[in-house]
Image (spheres, helix red, strand yellow):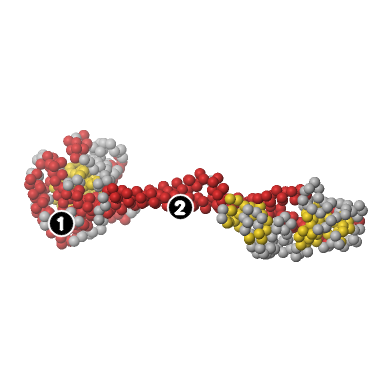
Amino acid sequence: MTFRPNRRLWISTIAILLATALGALAGYLTGRHTVQNAAEAVLQQDATPLSNTIHSLVVESHDILAKANALQTPTCSDAEIAQLRLLLYHSVNFREIGRIRDGKILCSAVFGKDHLPQAQFTATYHYSDGTTVFRDMAPYVVSGTPVFIRQRGNFFAVESPELSVHIHEMRKTREVFSSGATSLTSTAPLGRSKTLPGATIDHETAGRIGDNLFGTVCTSGSIGLSDSVHGQVDCATSFGSLSAALHAQRSLLALYAFRGAVPCGLTSALVLLLYWRRRSMPQQLIKAIRADRLYFVYQPIVDLSSGHIVAAETLARWKDDDGLQVGPDIFIPLAEERGLALEVARLALRHTLHDLGDTLRSDDSDFRVHINLTASDLADPQLLPMLEDSLTKAGVSPHKLVLELTESATARHSVAIEAVHRLRERGHSVQIDDFGTGYSSLAYLKDLAVDAIKIDKAFTQSIGTDSVTGIILPQILTLAAGLGLLVIAEGIEIPEQAAYFASFDLPVMGQGWLYGKPQCPGEFLSAIAAQDEQRVAVPIENNATTIGVPDHVPQHQDALQLRSAGDG
């Protein structure tokens, strides 16, 4: 089924938009996750000071009251009061410590044992470790500042009012949970019940419930240190809003969405382009061949000993309906699959005879043109009649047409041997293209009875390296010389490569960008017309043999100078 262009456009547009939207969504979700993780980390950092302060208070409370209860001095003696004052002096978070019995203060570090205040004791919290907490106990309340007093055993300790204010300020956006509790209901914005394991908390956690983010930091939670004086202890949690965090980072989210949308959109467009091209390519190629819409370019082949352009290879090119270049490595096999390979060869010969006919008909020139044949061409009974008819009508001698057989075309030995024999009988020169790629063994060359081999560019590029192809190349050239075969070196790009091939005692021609890229007919004919200007050779110095290299290419004298014949 072939889609109409407008339908294809609509389908492609929708697919690209959908892929772009999905990419943007994926990018946004990634950004959202990143923002949430960052916000939770900030909340954990925010909860840390409160957690540390509460933990420090609980630890010191436990320590100072334990030391007071361990005193062996007589009750409220001068020695005991002195010890209490010493404990208070070393205290960080407490401003008073004293002995208490049945709700009555017996003595304290601040008041001693005389002029003791009449305290009002009303317990606020009781804990299993024996600690009782009193809130705002007179006379320790100053200017309305909340004060907490802790009692354990026979002694009590009064927290610093400044510490209580500090904790109160920190608690405005935080919640504190007790490691000894089993189920706690937060009074902070969450409004959800939380359950924390008792006496085992020693970790940090963060998460989200609805739009609410929280970051929790837990202290040791060791047995005997649980406290809820400041709103349940040991784990401090800071709260935040996910929507607020996302709003604050909206530019970052947009960037994530963009970074997700662009690659997905471009990738989908490329995939669709390749899909539609592959889907419609056979039909487009058939129409292009029948409508003669292939075009052909010509690449110079140079005699390395003289620098002359002595031949050209005809190369087929094709642009599809979208104006995109399709490589011959794609459309030539496709044409062969569709039984159109000979039609491509027919078009190549027709265009070549039209474009270069005058040069080929000239008796003063031995210029030749090379055309490629595929395996299916060799087996096609119409090949020879087509060649003979075309050359006869154009008035071109058969020996001016060189036929290049791809190495894969020689895989069927019997067919290839017979085809080569018939082509040479009619005066054509035959050579194996891309030699060395695996189908034609060196021993098989003699049976094929071809006139030349074209060395694959992979061998040319291996010159000067230790690769396997670089090691095999001299053996191939030596064998070619022994069989009397002409050698054409493909893919020559630098003078050193040309010098290497010219150093062998056999006829060698070169082809590659060093001598010229594939050209349109006008450009190529101009090069032929200016043959004398285009001929370039390394200056003859010290009887050095010259190798043809174009003027515009920098010369490497040492690499290009070879010993003259007189040197042996």
Disc number for residue 129: none
Residue 565 in the image: x percent, y percent? 21, 44
Q: Residue at x 28, y 36 (%)?
A: 552
Estimate the x, y position of residue 458 in percent, counting from the top left.
29, 51
Report the residue marked by disc 2: 26
Residue 378 shows which numbered tag?
1
Q: Quadrant of residue 193?
A: bottom right
* Residue shown at 68% from the left, 61% from the top: 179
Please give left or right for residue 65 compared with residue 367 in the image: right
Residue toward you, 242 or 468: 242
Name the secondary structure under disc 2: helix
At which x and y percent is residue 507? 19, 47
Which residue is at the front of the view, 410 or 241? Answer: 241
Q: Earlier in the sequence, mark 2 or mark 1?
A: 2
> Is 201 in front, or is 477?
201
Nearest-to-viewer mark from 2 and 1: 2
Q: Amino acid at mark 1?
A: Leu
Residue name at image x 15 percent, y 60 percent:
415
Kindly identify the amino acid type of the residue bearing the numbered disc 2: Ala
